[in-house]
Image: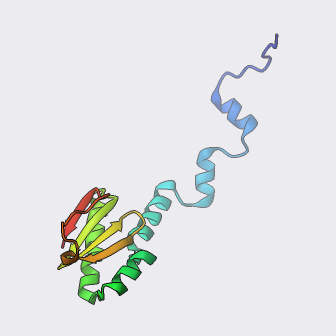
Amino acid sequence: MNKISNRFTSIEQVTDQYLKQKGTDAVKSSGISFEEVLKQKQEVTENSELRFSKHATMRLADRNINLSKEQSERLESGVMKAGEKGIHESLVIVDSLAFIVNVPNRTVVTAMDRNESADNIYTNIDGAVIM
C-alpha cells in the first residue's frame, strides 16, 4: 500500500512547486488577454472575403451567372446577417439568384437562378436570407 507522504495545505503550494509561471503571469508576459485575442480572431473572420467553392464557380460559369458589384455586396451582407442569427448553412436570395452558403466558413457552396429550380425546394439549410 502506497502512503502519500507529501501533504499540501493550499493550492498555491502545489502551483509554486510544479508550475514555473502562474496563469496570471503568463497573461501578463504576453501583454494580451484571452478576450483581446478572441476579439481579434472574430474580427478577422467577420472581415474575411466571401469565397466561392469550386462547385459554385462551375455552376456560375455553366449557368452564365455574372454578379454585379451591388449583387456581390448584397450577398456578403446576407451572409453577415445569417451569421449574426447563428445560421450555419443558409439560403441567400439576391434578386432571382439563389446561393447556398456555409456561413462559418464564408463559402458559397452552390449557386443557381431561382427560375432553374422548378420546385423551389432547398435542402440541408438551417435558415434563409432574402436580400
Quarter-of-image position of residue 14 = top right
For this rendering, which residue is in front, 48 or 34?
48
For this rendering, which residue is in front, 72 or 123?
123
Side of 127 where 19 appears, left or right: right
User: Which residue corresponds to the image point at 46% horizontal and 66% vertical from the top-left?
Assistant: 40
Which colour assignment does the render follow?
Answer: rainbow
Residue 15 drawn at (x, y percent): 68, 35
Number of dots carrying numbers: 0
Residue 126 drawn at (x, y percent): 28, 56
Q: Look at the picture and state if 10 lies above or below 105.
A: above
Residue 53 seen: no
User: Which residue corresponds to the image point at 34% horizontal and 68% vertical from the top-left?
Assistant: 101
**Residue reaching furthest to the front:** 118
For this rendering, which residue is in front, 77 or 38?
77
Image quarter of the N terminus: top right
Image quarter of the C terminus: bottom left
User: Which residue corresponds to the image point at 18% horizontal and 79% vertical from the top-left?
Assistant: 96
Residue 18 seen: yes
**Residue reaching furthest to the top:** 1
Residue 55 drawn at (x, y percent): 42, 75
Side of 117 where 58 appears, left or right: right
Residue 105 drawn at (x, y percent): 42, 66
Quarter-of-image position of residue 48 = bottom left
Side of 1 where 103 appears, left or right: left
Q: Look at the picture and state if 119 lies above or below 7.
A: below
